[in-house]
Amino acid sequence: MKNFSNSPLHNNQTPNHVRDRKNKKIGFLSAVPLRVPLRGYGFCMATLFLFCFGSLFYQLNGGPPEILLDIRQYLGESTYLDDHGPPAPRVLPFPSQVVYNRVGKCGSRTVVILLRLLAERHQFNLVSSDIHNKTRLTKHEQVDLMRNISNIPQPFLYTRHVHFLNFTRFRIEQPVYINIIRDPINRFLSNYFFRRFGDWRGEQNHLIRTPGMKDDERYLDINVCILENYPECSNPRLFYIIPYFCGQHPQCREPGVWALERAKQNVLENFLIVGILEELEDVLLLLERLLPHYFTDVLNIYKSPDYMKMGNMTGTVRKHTPTLEALQVLYHRMRYEYDFYNFIREQFHLMKKKIGLKSVSRPTAHQASFLRELAVRTPEPLDEDEELETDLEDANSWFVQP
């Protein structure tokens, strides 16, 4: 009798048993795919949540995760934000806030015409005030004007006939100042005749500017005005340039050392450049060097035929020089103005020397010819008490037109 315990069928089980085991294995494996989609579904949902959270975090913090930066190297530099987002902010030049508190009858209209052409070419905001006869402001008016200036889109250049404004006094960011002055007597003569007869734009222009001026005042001989101490030709009305640099303090309107020294200090601390009209081409070259984003190519524009035609229209008509005696009196009354003018002239020449600017203007004499002649004819200056004393309040109602 055969021993079945050692037979192959006994050891390896019957074919039916093998078939049943195989079916169990198949059944087990067939159940696995039913569990995998559930896990995959959970994994997908978790990934989607992380993506949404990461996207929100990216938008709130303004920066992408490092992994996206790594991926961007393979996708290229362009992103959706680059193509559809707001343009990149413009890099502003320095300084981007400039104030030209132009002094009347010191070439300011010439410069303003240039600025209009430059603003269009170089895309900066030029704001030129139409207020010509209010240089002294109340505290409230000062704050309002300074805030309005500060709110101009940068870069900007603001220009107006106004005495120096101290922005830092009211905790407002101080802009950079520029200006131009001229020989004080020449400025006075230009203003005297301009108020009466205008310029080459049309002699009837003066009737619009000074409609209340009577003929006896309009045709008043300038020598009579000076020698007979008419208010227009006496202090404090002759004390005109210094207050533009001294500021809004009431004492800035009083001819004296205090206003003079404060004006000098403000020039050194707050003005990028103060040029002199007698060397205008050098002033323009310095402005181009110091403020290229405003004044690049300004000298070529200034020398162009089209501009020269416009510039020639601003010259004052019927202007003539007073007698030597009248000039002598006038110079003495304007001694503080000349002290300041000589200071500005020295600072301007020092700046040209430091920058290494080769002058294109004819150098001006240290003194005008009539002043050198005065030094010969006048051994001693006039006494202090010979000067006409006028009420300062009267000066407040008198404003020089540009």
Image: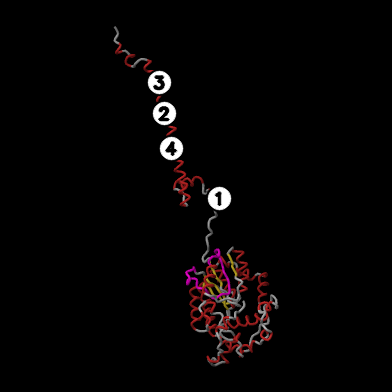
Q: CA distance from mark 4 to mark 1?
A: 32 Å
Residue 381, by quadrant, is bottom right
Q: Give the amino acid type for the residue marked by disc 3 in the picture.
A: Asn
Read off the residue under disc 3: 23
Residue 157, horizontal then vertical, whole percent: 56, 68
The residue located at (42%, 26%) in the rendering is 30
Q: CA distance from mark 1 to mark 3?
A: 60 Å
Seen from the viewer's position, the closer of residues 193 and 287 is: 193
Q: CA distance from mark 2 to mark 4?
A: 17 Å
Q: Earlier in the sequence, mark 4 or mark 1?
A: 4
Q: CA distance from mark 2 to mark 3?
A: 15 Å
Counting labels gives 4
Is residue 296 one of those drawn in magenta? no
The residue carrying pointer 2 sits among few (fewer than 14), some (14 to 19) or many (20 or more) residues within 10 Å by Cα, namely: few
Q: Residue 356: in sight, yes or no? A: no
The residue range painted magenta reads 150-173
SS label for mark 1 = helix
Q: Earlier in the sequence, mark 3 or mark 4?
A: 3
Seen from the viewer's position, the closer of residues 326 and 238 is: 238
Q: Give the amino acid type for the residue marked by disc 1 in the picture.
A: His
Residue 20, horizontal then vertical, whole percent: 38, 18
Q: Earlier in the sequence, mark 2 or mark 3?
A: 3
Residue found at the far front of this picture = 140
Read off the residue under disc 4: 43
Residue 126, horizontal then vertical, whole percent: 59, 67
Residue 389, horizontal then vertical, whole percent: 55, 88
- Contact, CB < 8 Å: mark 1 with mark 3? no
Q: Nearer the viewer, mark 2 or mark 1?
A: 2
Read off the residue under disc 2: 32
Read off the residue under disc 1: 84
The residue carrying pointer 3 sits among few (fewer than 14), some (14 to 19) or many (20 or more) residues within 10 Å by Cα, namely: few
